[in-house]
Amino acid sequence: MTIGNSRKVCYLLESGYLQQRFIGEDGVSNYFINFPGEFVTLPIIEEHIPYETNFSFLSDAVWWEIDFEYLRGVLRTEDPKNFILLQFAVESRYRLYTLATMRKMDAEKRVIFTLLRLARFGMRVKDDQRELPLFTSYAVIADMSDTSKSYTTAVLAKLRKQDILVSQNAPWVIKKMGVLQDILGTDIEEKPPF
């Protein structure tokens, strides 16, 4: 599904996972994943709405289309201190920071960064292990890291050989989160979960 920036509705994801992709003014494709209970769109500042956004459901999902004027009235009454709008603004700014960070990385680090981002939507198995979401695949990682599928496969094979990743069966498991974080030189656990 594709929507333009003249929308007068917002979307709330009740269940499932959704990939949001938009093309920046520089022509570079950007993406992030929405998770259950999150507003997918909330047009709080018109200038910050991408010209066109493509949505792809990564799993079975339920979402609500809400008239923005109606929501504005409800928020005025139920959230007079604007916590919901502030939280959305903080999340969207952090997502933009994440996208800017990813643009500075080489292809191998983008694949690793994508794995760590997907781990945020997975399940903690042990302290240093994460089960990745069931929608994880070579094609999804290649698309999200903006690399070819063959290159992504080569990077993931290297990680399997180093016993960092198990990807033969679903769900995939990252066995050594700390090693991946060390490769990037960042601690993703200190970042917000989006």
Image (tube, grey):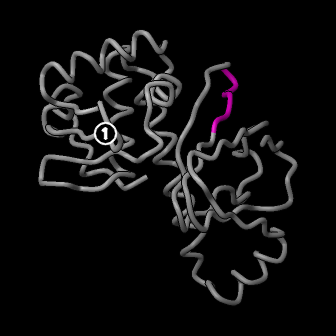
Q: Residues within 10 Å of mark 1 (few under 14, many from 20)?
A: many
Q: Nearer the viewer, residue 132 or 54?
A: 132
- Residue 186, magenta (yes or no): no
Indicate left or right for 154 with 186 as reference: right
Count of residue discs:
1
Q: Residue furthest bottom?
A: 77
Q: Position of residue 119 (x, y in %)?
A: 33, 45
Q: Nearer the viewer, residue 91 or 167?
A: 167
Q: Which residue is mark 1?
A: 172
Q: Position of residue 111 (x, y in %)?
A: 37, 24
Q: Position of residue 170 (x, y in %)?
A: 35, 41
Q: Which quadrant of the figure has residue 97?
A: top left
Residue at 77% of width from left, 51% of height from top?
Answer: 46
Position above or below: 91 against 176:
below
Q: Label 1 is placed on what type of residue?
A: Trp
Secondary structure of residue under mark 1: loop
Q: Nearer the viewer, residue 22 or 25?
A: 22
Q: Position of residue 73 (x, y in %)?
A: 79, 82
Residue at 33% of width from left, 16% of height from top?
Answer: 108
Residue at 69% of width from left, 60% of height from top?
Answer: 42
Indicate left or right for 79 with 74 as reference: left
Magenta part of the chain: 21-26
Residue at 76% of width from left, 75% of height from top?
Answer: 71
Q: Nearer the viewer, residue 157 or 99?
A: 157
- Residue 24, magenta (yes or no): yes
Position above or below: 144 against 11:
above
Position above or below: 159 against 5:
above
- Image quarter hosting the N terminus: top right
